[in-house]
Image (cartoon, helix red, strand yellow):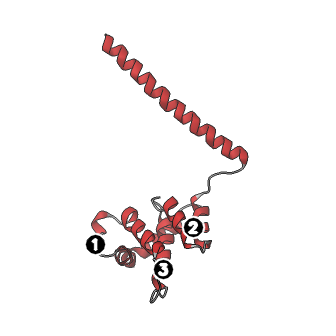
Amino acid sequence: MQSRWITILMLSVLLGGVVALYSWSLGTYAAMVRRGSRPATLEQQLQQFRDETDPEKRMALVRKFGHIQDPRVVVALMEAVQDEIAKDWTGSTETPGLLLLASFTVVTYHIPEEDRSFGKYWTVALRWWKWNENVVRCRAWSVPK
């Protein structure tokens, strides 16, 4: 009988913590809305990513939305990979950080395990993109806005 009460007490403490955390997060979100700073939607983040010219800011945006399982994210990341590959890197001392991060993100979060191969991340991502671009673009186009 005593262990039953201990179990009930432990559950109530745990649930109380979850309820407190949930209400705190709702309060934080409500305060953000009152201040007029709603979190950016994925569509807004992707547009900001496409418009941004600074590589460091673009990499920060990749870190922010790259893990999201959405075909629009894959399209934006692969467009960035293709743009970075198209640059002339000969004689450059600049590190292709966006190329590395975007291709790593695609391989890690968006390419199924069975479709991954060995090689540099951008090579793996481009090889997969060659075979799956049409399907991914159709899925991205059909996502409701």
First in sequence: mark 2 vs mark 1: 2
Q: For the residue labelled by badge 2, is the local secondary structure a helix, a strand or a loop?
A: helix
Q: Nearer the viewer, residue 130 or 39?
A: 39
2 or 1: mark nearer the eye? 2
Q: Residues within 10 Å of mark 1 (few under 14, many from 20)?
A: some
Image location (x, y in percent) of residue 43 = 59, 62
First in sequence: mark 2 vs mark 3: 2
> Residues under labels 2 and 3: Cα distance?
16 Å
The answer to whether mark 2 and mark 1 are in CB contact below 8 A is: no
- The residue type indicated by label 3 comes to Glu
Does residue 78 appear in this view?
no
The answer to whether mark 1 and mark 3 are in CB contact below 8 A is: no
1 or 3: mark nearer the eye? 3
Q: For the residue labelled by badge 1, is the local secondary structure a helix, a strand or a loop?
A: loop
> Residues under labels 1 and 3: Cα distance?
27 Å
Quadrant of the frame with the C terminus: bottom right
Residue furthest to the front: 93
Q: Label 3 belongs to which residue?
A: 94
Q: Residues within 10 Å of mark 3 (few under 14, many from 20)?
A: few
Q: Which quadrant of the structure image shows residue 111? A: bottom left
Image location (x, y in percent) of residue 104 = 39, 68
Image location (x, y in percent) of residue 79 = 50, 76
Q: Residue at x 62, y 72 (%)?
A: 51
Q: Residue at x 39, y 74 (%)?
A: 132
Q: Label 2 belongs to which residue?
A: 57
Q: Label 1 belongs to which residue?
A: 117
2 or 3: mark nearer the eye? 3
Q: Residue at x 35, y 19 (%)?
A: 7
Residue furthest to the top: 1
Quadrant of the frame with the N terminus: top left
Q: Nearer the viewer, residue 111 or 3?
A: 3
- The residue type indicated by label 1 comes to Ser
